[in-house]
């Protein structure tokens, strides 16, 4: 497979942004809760309420907006945030091409 120029940086940024926008947000609170003994592992039941989903998405949009503004307005701070987010992703798989 031919590697695309800049792919490694894009992969690093994508993973870091996901960590910052999702992993370290409200979804982590849901993940930290107890497993439901009745519906654990069953795809037949919703595991996230509408209110939880709304909170997760709003937080992700806020973080994404902040990061995109920072990328343009303060590239050094953006790079620092990507470095921070990348700490959480060292064992994550790369995205599919």
Image: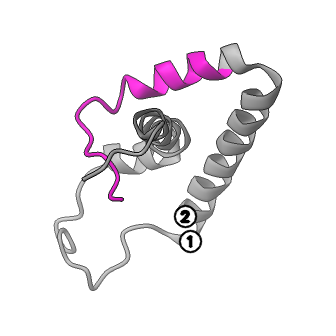
Where does residue 6 sit, x and y in percent of width and height? 48, 36
Is 59 in front, or is 37?
59
Q: Quadrant of the C terminus?
A: bottom left
- Asked if the residues shown at circle 2 and circle 1 are in contact, with their CB atoms under 8 angstroms apart, the answer is yes
On whether residue 50 falls in the magenta region, the answer is no
The label number, if any, that marks residue 53 in the structure image = 2
Q: Residue at x 36, y 69 (%)?
A: 47
Q: Residue furthest right?
A: 73
Is 94 in front, or is 38?
94
On whether residue 82 falls in the magenta region, the answer is yes
**Dot 1 lies on which element?**
helix
Where does residue 22 sit, x and y in percent of width and height? 49, 46
Where does residue 44 sit, x and y in percent of width and height? 27, 85
Q: Residue at x 40, y 35 (%)?
A: 8
Up/down of 87 relative to 93, above or below? above
Q: Which residue is mark 1?
A: 50
Q: Residue at x 41, y 43 (%)?
A: 28
**Dot 2 lies on which element?**
helix
**What segment is highlighted magenta in the picture?**
78-97
């Amino acid at each position: 497979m031919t590697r695309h120029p800049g792919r490694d940086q894009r992969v690093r940024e994508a993973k870091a942004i996901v960590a910052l926008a999702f992993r370290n947000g409200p979804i982590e609170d849901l993940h930290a809760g107890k497993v439901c003994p009745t519906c654990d592992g069953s795809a037949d039941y919703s595991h996230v309420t509408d209110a939880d989903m709304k909170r997760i998405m709003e937080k992700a949009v806020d973080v994404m907006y902040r990061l995109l503004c920072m990328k343009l307005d303060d590239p050094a701070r953006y790079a620092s945030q990507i470095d921070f987010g990348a700490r959480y992703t060292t064992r994550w798989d790369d995205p599919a091409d």
